[in-house]
Image (tube, rainbow, N blue to C red):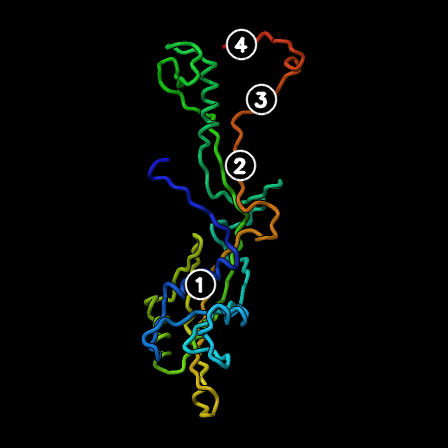
């Protein structure tokens, strides 16, 4: 394979793929730190859908002896999923799948099937006699003037996938701290990391999802009540992600990617061939006469 070509794996895109993309962006790319009693530490990021027993077993330092979460802490929750038919991607119209056992709607890749294309070219060369010698199997086809003839029997291998479905997914990020200074450290990157816009790209398994940080930062602090409750500062940041999913996941019976090959010639057998009679337009080798 030439150095400038490479195989690009195509992973399926599901709701979990979009979730991972947002989590990776927040945990790895944002990589938020703040000052705690142990120094300048990374703030843990938790997916709030996980069971409490799993969280305790995974990282016992996230809760104290009473089972209360140790702050500061960031949690993510997927709150809303909307399928908007007006939001389209590369395919503006709906493309139904092919009515066979494979399915597939959109072509994502195409390449020449080298071995089968060479078989057709060699078969044509074997039938034609050239100036350098008769019936050479790998001799390139040329016209009467010695110019090469284009091979029109090219076998292509195409890869198709189901029709992508585009979704608007809303994620709610909750930032909880014990002190105002910690909250300032953690909220500021959400306002400044994207510059003058609210746009960023989340990635996972080769997929990219356009995301937008919403302009409102809702604060749900309890310090103004001046009561005996546990003091906390909490800020919610909403993120709108333009995601897409392909296929039905584990419930899909048809393959996620379909590989097909095109037909390059069509032959209709004659009854004379079946009974063994050789027509007059066929030579001794069994090929059409020139």
State which tag comes first along the sequence, 1 or 4.
1
Instruction: Kindly check if marks 1 and 4 are in contact, taking CB atoms under 8 A apart as contact.
Output: no
Q: In the rendered image, which residue does mark 1 sit on?
A: 22
State which tag comes first along the sequence, 2 or 1.
1
- Of circles 3 and 2, the one toward us is 2
Residue 116, given in percent of the width and then of the height, sits at 48, 27
Q: Is residue 79 visible?
A: no
Residue at point 34% right, 71% down? 189
Residue 81, given in percent of the width and then of the height, sits at 54, 64
Q: CA distance from mark 2 to mark 1?
A: 35 Å
Q: Secondary structure at mark 3?
A: loop
Q: Secondary structure at mark 4?
A: loop
Instruction: Kindly check if marks 3 and 2 are in contact, taking CB atoms under 8 A apart as contact.
Output: no
Residue 260 marker: 2
Q: CA distance from mark 1 to mark 4?
A: 66 Å
Q: Secondary structure at mark 1?
A: helix
- Nearest to the observer: residue 65 or residue 178: 65
Looking at the image, residue 230 lies above or below residue 166: below
Residue at point 38% right, 41% down? 6
- Of circles 3 and 4, the one toward us is 4
Q: In the rendered image, which residue does mark 4 sit on?
A: 285
Q: In the rendered image, which residue does mark 3 sit on?
A: 267
* The quadrant where residue 85 appears: bottom right
Looking at the image, residue 220 lies above or below residue 136: below
Q: CA distance from mark 1 to mark 3?
A: 54 Å
- Nearest to the observer: residue 153 or residue 95: 153
């Amino acid at each position: 394979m030439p150095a400038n070509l490479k195989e690009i794996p195509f992973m399926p895109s599901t709701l979990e793929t979009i979730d991972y993309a947002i989590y990776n962006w927040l945990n790895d790319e944002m990589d938020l730190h703040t000052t705690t009693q142990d120094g300048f530490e990374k703030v843990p990021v938790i997916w709030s859908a996980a069971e409490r027993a799993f969280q305790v077993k995974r990282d016992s330092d996230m809760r104290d002896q009473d089972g209360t979460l140790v702050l500061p802490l960031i949690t993510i929750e997927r709150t809303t999923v909307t399928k908007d038919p007006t939001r389209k991607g590369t395919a503006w119209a709906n493309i139904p799948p092919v009515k066979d056992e494979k399915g597939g709607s959109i072509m994502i890749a195409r390449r020449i099937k080298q071995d089968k294309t060479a078989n057709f070219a060699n078969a044509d060369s074997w039938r034609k006699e050239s100036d350098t010698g008769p019936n050479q199997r790998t001799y390139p086809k040329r016209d009467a003037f010695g110019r090469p003839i284009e091979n029109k029997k090219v076998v292509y291998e195409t890869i198709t996938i189901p029709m992508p479905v585009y979704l608007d997914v809303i994620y709610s990020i909750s930032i909880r701290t014990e002190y105002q200074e910690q909250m300032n450290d953690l909220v500021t990157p959400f306002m400044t990391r994207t510059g003058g816009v609210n746009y960023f790209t989340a990635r996972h398994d080769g997929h990219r999802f356009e995301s937008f940080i919403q302009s409102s930062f809702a604060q749900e602090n309890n310090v103004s009540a001046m009561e005996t409750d546990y003091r906390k500062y909490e800020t919610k940041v909403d993120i709108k992600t333009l995601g897409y999913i392909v296929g039905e996941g584990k419930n899909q019976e048809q393959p996620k990617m379909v590989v097909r090959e095109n037909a390059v010639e069509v032959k209709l057998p004659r009854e004379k061939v079946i009974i063994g009679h050789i027509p007059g337009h066929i030579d001794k080798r069994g090929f059409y006469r020139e």
